[in-house]
Amino acid sequence: MMLLDTNEPRGFEPIATAIVLRTVATCYQMCHHPDDRALIGVGLFTVTPQDDGYRFASHGQVLRDGDMPALLDWLEQRIPQSGAIISWDSWWPVTRRLAALIDPALHPRTVAAIADPDGRWRDLPRSMTWHMEQAPVPAMPCLCGPAPHPDCVPELPAALLPDPAEAEHTMMREAARGWACWANSFGDFDDHEHPARRALAAFREHAGEVRQAG
C-alpha cells in the first residue's frame, strides 16, 4: 500500500523547495565511503506564494573544476530557512548524502535543515517517486595509479563531467517534477480551491510559458 503524506500534522506547505542531487560513480575502491558516488551537481526548484498566485524559481549548479566544497557552499547559501524541503531517494536519501559530505562549521544552515526539528524536510517514499530517475552520467575512470597507493580520492576532471549547461537544465527540470509529485499527493484528492490544486494549476501555467519562451 502506498502511504501518502497526510494533511495533518505535516500537510501541504505553500512555501517549498525541491532539492535534487546529481552524482557520478567513481573508483570501485570508494564503494565503502559515504561519498562513493561523487556529488557533481545540485538542482533547486522553489515555490512561494505571491499576491493571488505563486512564484516559481529554478537554480542549478554543477562542478566545472572538480571543487566539491564549492558546490556545497553554493547550496549552503540557498538552503531555505522556512517552508518545506522536498527530496527523494536517488543513490541514497539526499539528507544522508549531504550529512556525510558537509562540514558543520562551514554549512550550519544545511546542518540545521537536515536535523529537521520542525518536520520541514519531506523525503518522499520510493513508491511515489519510482519514475524520478536520475539522468545517466558516465562513470569516472579509476585514476588511482598503480598499487600501492593511499586511500582512493575521487578525481573529477572537468573534461569528463557532463556538459554544465545541459546538466543544470536537466536538474532544474527534475527538481520541478519532484515538487509537482509531492504537491499531487495532496491535490489529487481535494477540490479546486485546495492550495495544492491552485499551486499545481499555477505551475502548469508557468511551465507552458517557459516552453513558449523556448
Image (cartoon, rainbow, N blue to C red):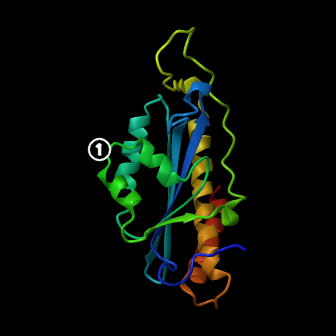
Q: Position of residue 140 (x, y in %)?
A: 62, 27
Residue wearing tag 1: 106
State the residue in front, 90 or 79: 90
Secondary structure of the residue carrying numbered label 1: loop
Residue 118 falls left or right of residue 143? left
Q: Position of residue 117 (x, y in %)?
A: 36, 67
State the residue in front, 213 or 146: 146
State the residue in front, 32 or 112: 32
Q: Position of residue 154 (x, y in %)?
A: 51, 26
Whether residue 20 is visible to the viewer of this picture, yes or no, is yes
Q: Quadrant of residue 211?
A: bottom right
Q: Position of residue 124 (x, y in %)?
A: 59, 65
Instruction: Residue at 59% x, 74% y: name it.
Output: 183
As shown in the figure, which amino acid type bears the numbered disc 1?
Answer: Leu
Q: Is residue 45 above or below residue 35?
A: below
Instruction: Residue at 47% x, 82% y: name it.
Output: 9
Q: Is residue 163 above or below residue 191?
A: above
Image quadrant where one finds the C terminus: bottom right
Q: Is residue 186 above or below residue 210?
A: below
Q: Residues within 10 Å of mark 1 (few under 14, many from 20)?
A: few
Q: Quadrant of residue 74?
A: top left
Instruction: Residue at 58% x, 32% y: name it.
Output: 31
